[in-house]
Amino acid sequence: MNLRRWFFLFWTALLIGAAGALGTGLIMMLVNGEKMNGIADFMLYLLILFGSGVMISVYSQMGFFAYLILNYMGKGVFPRRGWQIVQVVLTVLALLDIMFLRLFVGGGRERISDIVLGLIILAAAIVTAYVKVKQTHISALVPTLFFMIAVTAVETIGVLRIDVNAATIFIVIPLLLCNAYQMLILHKLVDSSKEAAVNPAPSR
């Protein structure tokens, strides 16, 4: 990936994160019936949403490039099939962690919101993986699911500690949009040899 393409990815991901935060924040404001004290407060609210979306996008991009490095190292340590198995195991563990960990740690307290969050992330991952496979090759299935579930789970640790559903929704929706966008556009920005390094074709 050359510098021009990296800048394209960076700025477009920023816009997607900002748009996702604006849309999510405005919908939440309407659902909660919140009122603004004049146009100045509303514009300030939009500015805060925009800035938050930009920061979420930067956070997402950090996770994306960390994943690329991890994938490169994993392919160097494990055989191809072994690395796929490792990704599948980590993906399943990450999803179970999101959905059920706090249920047991919290002494059996009901955590329906965690289960819903896990299902949302799983649905987003399945849709992204389906589109990615259609655009590229079946070998992209496991890496895409791993990134969309396991990496997203790591990225949401901070907001889950806050334990506020509204904050979780506001962070996770733009985060999923940015993660999906980066994964789906990857093969369009890198050379075929680089994409093959991330999603290797199956051996014959």
Image (cartoon, rainbow, N blue to C red):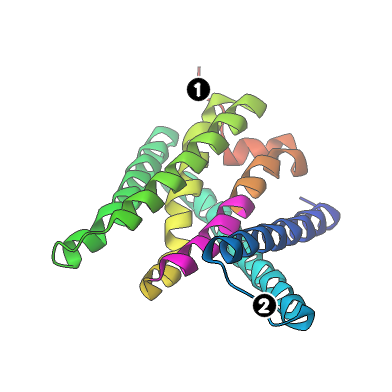
**Label 1 secondary element:** loop
Magenta range is 164-178
Nearer-N-terminus badge (2/1): 2
Residue drawn at x 50%, y 22% as measured from the top left: 203
Whether residue 47 appears in magenta in the rendering, the answer is no
Displayed quadrant of residue 170: bottom right
From this viewpoint, which residue is outermost toward the left? 107
How far apart in space, not on screen, are marks 2 and 1 (Cα)? 59 Å
Residue drawn at x 18%, y 66% as measured from the top left: 105
Q: Is residue 76 visible?
A: no
Q: Residue 199: x percent and y percent?
A: 57, 36
Residue drawn at x 49%, y 61% as measured from the top left: 169
Indicate whether 204 appears above or below 140: above
Residue under label 2, please give it. 36
Q: Nearer the viewer, residue 2 or 188?
A: 188
Indicate whether 106 appears above or below 125: below
Q: Nearer the viewer, residue 2 or 105?
A: 105
Displayed quadrant of residue 64: bottom right
Tell me the chief SS of the magenta region. Answer: helix
Q: Residue 39: x percent and y percent?
A: 78, 78
Looking at the rendered structure, the kind of residue marked 1 is Ser
From this viewpoint, which residue is outermost toward the right? 4
Residue under label 1, please give it. 203
Q: Nearer the viewer, residue 160 or 89?
A: 160
**Label 2 secondary element:** loop
Q: Is residue 31 left or right of residue 107?
A: right
